């Protein structure tokens, strides 16, 4: 074999190897997409089997984040301005609504935070009720 033939064979092998790699990467990408779809479907099925709607579960996840923020807020601030009280009450009601739609087992780790927010919610409601009765 001469030098030109060896070079031509090497070029053919490189092209062939490149085509194989492209096909392998395409197959890997397809497999990964299928795995993602299967995992998503399994998660949805588990949510449905738990008796919940996906929308309720998603609102619970967002409410869980809000619960953490309200907890920090409730611990940090003892006295709130009337505007802050209204915002706190509205956000707490959203959290309570989302938590009511999911099984208790999902949020038992957050029970202490939930109760702290509920206590603060009740305190604000009582203060606002007393103020409204004084104004009457």
Image (tube, rainbow, N blue to C red):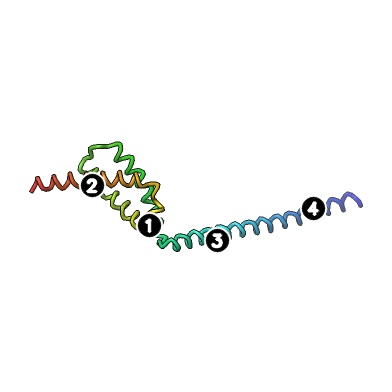
What is the spatial separation of the Cα atoms under label 1 and label 4, in whole angstroms? 62 Å
Residue shown at 77% from the left, 52% from the top? 14
Location of mark 3 (residue): 38
Contact between marks 4 and 2 (CB within 8 A): the answer is no
**Are discs 3 and 2 less than 8 Å apart at CB?**
no
How far apart marks 1 and 2 lie (CA) works out to 22 Å
Residue at 28 percent of width and 52 percent of height: 93
Quickly name the residue at label 2.
122
Q: CA distance from mark 4 to mark 2?
A: 78 Å
The disc at residue 11 is 4
Front of the two marks 4 and 3: 3
Q: Secondary structure at mark 4?
A: helix
User: Which badge, 4 or 3, comes first in the chain's sequence?
Assistant: 4
Q: Which residue is mark 1?
A: 102
Q: Secondary structure at mark 3?
A: helix
User: Which mark, by number, is residue 83?
Assistant: none
Compared across the picture, whether 89 is left or right of 1 comes to: left
Q: Image quarter for residue 112? A: top left
From the viewer's perspective, is the residue at label 3 or at label 2 nearer? 2
Can residue 87 be seen here? no
Q: Between marks 3 and 2, how big is the CA–CA gap?
A: 44 Å
């Amino acid at each position: 074999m001469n030098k030109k033939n060896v070079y031509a064979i090497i070029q053919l092998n490189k092209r062939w190897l490149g085509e194989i790699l492209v096909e392998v990467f395409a197959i890997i990408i397809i497999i990964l997409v299928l795995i993602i779809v299967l995992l998503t479907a399994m998660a949805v099925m588990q949510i449905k089997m738990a008796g919940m709607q996906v929308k309720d579960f998603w609102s619970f996840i967002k409410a869980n984040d809000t619960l953490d923020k309200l907890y920090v807020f409730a611990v940090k601030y003892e006295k709130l301005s009337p505007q802050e009280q209204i915002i706190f009450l509205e956000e707490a009601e959203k959290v309570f609504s989302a938590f009511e739609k999911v099984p208790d087992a999902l949020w038992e780790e957050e029970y202490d935070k939930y109760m702290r927010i509920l206590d603060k919610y009740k305190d604000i409601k009582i203060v606002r009720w007393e103020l409204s009765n004084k104004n009457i």
